């Protein structure tokens, strides 16, 4: 992400097919052509939660930051910020929980240029906010966290906690069983 400085290129991690569609559409129709890097895991193709309706393709535009429209600002005390596939793990877990109304889940669809103003507005929207957490399924020293810790979190009006896998020299753990166990732990810590 450091190489994207000075608007050298756009980095995005869309969390739905419609978001991906609108991102590509915006990129191809834009008068300013910068390289575009898109992170899209194949596992999202199988997720029912991530599916988009035909209306989502035919209307709207790409949103660099997606707020949690379902969250009640008077009930939310924890804001979970995330990007990409982990969004749907968090959404599924929130629906299972009795205290799910305490949590808002907002998505950073465009990692660079950074949507700092939108993140600040989302934090300000919740008057009873006690915790803001960045949730990523990459290890702590990978993914957006290191870049955002230096360039975004110091400029928002809240302390942002990291929920991720431990530091690692590899972006993945190597076995499905271990990945599943770590993912369950990661989601549990996000809602703790």
Image (cartoon, rainbow, N blue to C red):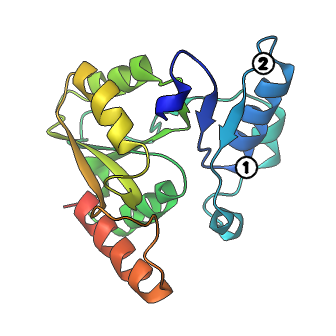
Residue at 47% x, 36% y: name it: 69
Secondary-structure class at tag 2: loop
Q: How far apart are marks 2 and 1 (CA)?
A: 22 Å
Residue at 46 percent of width and 70 percent of height: 172
Determine the residue positioned at 20% across, 22% down.
Answer: 157
| N-terminal-most mark, 2 or 1 | 1
Q: Is 95 located above or below residue 6 in the figure?
A: below
User: Residue placed at 41% from the left, 59% from the top?
Assistant: 138
> Does residue 70 show up?
yes
Q: Which residue lies furthest to the bottom in this view?
A: 177
Q: Residue 17 has which mark? A: 1
Image quadrant where residue 24 sits = top right
Above/below status of 176 relative to 26: below
Mark 2 lies on residue: 33
Answer yes or no: do the residues labelled 2 and 1 have beta carbons within 8 Å?
A: no
Determine whether 90 is above or below 110 in the image: below
Relative horizontal placement of residue 85, taking residue 51 as reference (left or right): left
SS assignment at label 1: helix
């Amino acid at each position: 992400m450091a190489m994207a400085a000075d608007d050298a290129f756009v980095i995005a991690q869309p969390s739905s097919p419609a978001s991906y569609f609108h991102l590509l559409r915006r990129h191809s129709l834009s008068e300013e052509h910068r390289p575009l890097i898109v992170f899209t895991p194949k596992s999202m193709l199988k997720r029912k939660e991530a599916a988009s309706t035909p209306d989502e393709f035919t209307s709207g535009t790409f949103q660099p930051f997606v707020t949690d429209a379902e969250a009640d600002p008077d009930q939310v005390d924890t804001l979970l910020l995330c990007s990409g596939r982990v969004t749907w793990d968090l959404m599924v877990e929130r629906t299972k929980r009795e205290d799910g109304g305490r949590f808002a889940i907002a998505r950073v669809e465009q990692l660079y240029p950074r949507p700092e103003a939108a993140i600040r507005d989302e934090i300000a929207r919740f008057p009873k906010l006690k915790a803001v957490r960045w949730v990523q399924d990459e290890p702590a020293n990978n993914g957006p966290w290191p870049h955002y810790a230096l360039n975004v979190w110091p400029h928002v009006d809240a302390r942002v906690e990291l929920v991720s896998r431990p530091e690692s020299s590899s972006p993945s753990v190597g076995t499905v069983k271990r990945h599943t166990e770590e993912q369950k732990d990661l989601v549990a810590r996000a809602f703790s």
